[in-house]
């Protein structure tokens, strides 16, 4: 296994990080104690961070170690600490625990590596709790933070990190990865890459999950059938249902399985009595699961809004007469009808309101209300056009 094989279209970033990992313990000008990997969603920030970590955790600098890459891929390496987002944000308690563990030296590797997958989702108190740890880490500890942009990270943390910026890979690069790594037929791989707008994780899901493709197609079809305030409201409700279904990876069966595993780790067999002293831990575990479900639905809503923005961006291109491949090529006929009825001005109005909806949801406005407000613009644009 080689985690670098999952990185596409990031030649410069890969070269920088591999050179730094290969020079570990040698050239201090290439390896710094803190890194900030930035790039748009789907550019492969986390994949790059874990590949970099695997090389840093390999026993010998400059030599590929299969075992280290497998352990990092499974998130089981003893010297790897991962600070992720179980809920909507990274809480201060999780940040403090990561900082505490990062203060120890490596147990079996040349380094101890801490990856913060969603540094932009840290609360301000969580970010401040990491500041000192990042500012004055033990000599062998390496921090890798991932965020959409440098502006999403506190300036005090950003100034202490070396930045590596990623770009959106081309659809052809993503399609090639899906074909080579997942055995997806080239035509399906390219369609999935385009519809995912080169978001690697989403493209892989669309290419390998027929239900995901069906839900996306339903989203596009529902949006194109909006012609009144009533159908806009119904569409918003349908999209919330789709987002909930899209988060179904945390279904009841899996949740029960995860809880049973958690109890076994505490030495409690399924159906056994939970001792009073560990009931608090079980309550917190269940709370974390609920937070993950909540985040899954919220992320599903955001993916739908991104898909809708691609749809009306296609409509804008058609309205102004740009002749090129559309993201939603399979819906070209319906897109052309909307473009003819609403025109470029109508398409722009819808795009603006969809963007506002994303911002509102990010500010904790109820997703259904924000989506309804945006979708009403679709019917208004048709009527005004």
Image: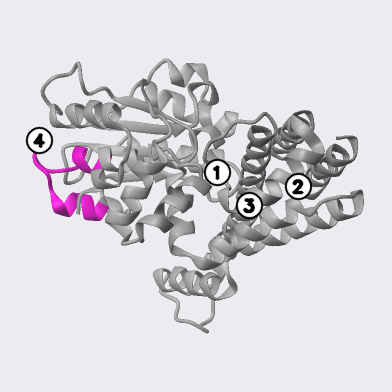
| SS class, disc 4 | loop
Circle 4 residue = 62
User: Between disc 3 and disc 2, whose residue precedes?
Assistant: 3
Please state the horizontal and vertical placement of residue 112, each as a whole percent of the image. Answer: 26, 38
The span shown in magenta is 53-71
**Residue hosting label 1:** 327
Identify the mark nearer the N-term, 2 or 4. 4
- Disc 3/disc 1 C-alpha distance (Å): 9 Å
Which comes before the other along the chain, label 2 or label 1? 1
Q: Quadrant of the C terminus?
A: top right
Figure check: 361 above or below 23: below
Q: Quadrant of residue 130?
A: top left
Asked if residue 375 shows in the view, the reply is: yes
Q: Tell me the CA gap for discs 2 and 1.
A: 25 Å
User: Does residue 131 lie above or below 229 as drawn?
Assistant: above
Identify the residue shown where x is 53% and y is 36%: 324
Mark 4, mark 1: which one is toward the viewer? 1
Closer to the eye: label 4 or 3: 3
Say few, some or many: other residues with alpha carbon within 10 Å of mark 4 (under 14 / 14 to 19 / 20 or more).
some
Q: Quadrant of residue 26?
A: top left
Q: Separation of disc 4 and disc 1 at Cα?
A: 41 Å
Name the residue that disc number 3 marks: 331
What residue is drawn where x is 69% and y is 46%? 335
Q: Nearer the viewer, residue 119 or 42?
A: 42
Question: 205 above or below 34?
Answer: below
Which of the marked residues, 4 or 1, is nearer the chain's N terminus?
4
**How many residues crowd mark 2 within 10 Å: few (<14), some (14–19), many (20+)?**
some
Q: Are marks 4 and 1 in contact (CB under 8 Å)?
A: no
Residue 53 percent coordinates (x, y)? 26, 40
Residue at image location 34% in from the left, 42% down from the top: 173
In the rendered view, how is the structure colored? one colour
The residue carrying mark 2 is 367
């Amino acid at each position: 296994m080689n985690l670098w094989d999952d990185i596409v279209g990031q030649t410069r970033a890969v070269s920088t990080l591999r050179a730094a990992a290969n020079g570990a313990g040698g050239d201090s000008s290439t390896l710094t104690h803190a890194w900030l990997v930035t790039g748009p969603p789907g550019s492969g920030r986390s994949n790059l961070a874990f590949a970099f970590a695997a090389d840093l955790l390999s026993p010998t600098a400059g030599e590929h170690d299969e075992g280290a890459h497998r352990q990092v891929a499974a998130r089981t390496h003893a010297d790897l600490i991962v600070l992720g987002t179980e809920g909507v944000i990274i809480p201060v308690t999780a940040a403090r625990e990561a900082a505490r563990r990062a203060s120890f030296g490596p147990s079996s590797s040349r380094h101890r590596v801490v990856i913060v997958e969603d540094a932009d989702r840290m609360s301000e108190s969580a970010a401040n709790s990491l500041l000192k740890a990042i500012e004055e880490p033990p000599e062998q500890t390496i921090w890798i933070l991932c965020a959409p942009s440098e502006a999403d990270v506190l300036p005090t943390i950003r100034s202490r990190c070396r930045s590596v910026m990623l770009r959106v890979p081309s659809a052809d690069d993503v399609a090639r990865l899906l074909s080579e790594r997942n055995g997806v037929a080239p035509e399906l791989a390219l369609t999935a890459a385009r519809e995912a707008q080169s978001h690697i994780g989403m493209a892989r899901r669309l290419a390998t999950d027929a239900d995901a493709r069906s839900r996306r197609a339903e989203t596009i079809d529902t949006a194109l059938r909006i012609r009144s305030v009533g159908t806009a409201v119904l569409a918003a409700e349908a999209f919330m249902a789709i987002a909930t279904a899209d988060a179904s990876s945390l279904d009841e069966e899996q949740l029960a399985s995860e809880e049973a595993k958690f109890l076994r780790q505490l030495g409690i067999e399924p159906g056994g009595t939970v001792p009073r002293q560990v009931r608090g831990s079980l309550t917190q575990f269940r709370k974390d699961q609920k937070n993950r479900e909540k985040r899954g639905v919220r992320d599903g809503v955001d993916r739908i809004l991104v898909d809708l923005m691609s749809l009306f961006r296609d409509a804008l291109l058609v309205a102004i007469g740009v002749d090129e491949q559309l993201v939603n090529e399979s819906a070209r006929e319906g897109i052309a009808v909307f473009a003819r009825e609403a025109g470029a001005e109508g398409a722009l109005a819808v795009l603006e309101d969809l963007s506002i909806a994303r911002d509102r949801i990010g500010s904790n406005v109820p997703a259904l209300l924000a989506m309804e407000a945006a979708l009403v613009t679709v019917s208004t644009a048709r009527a005004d056009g």
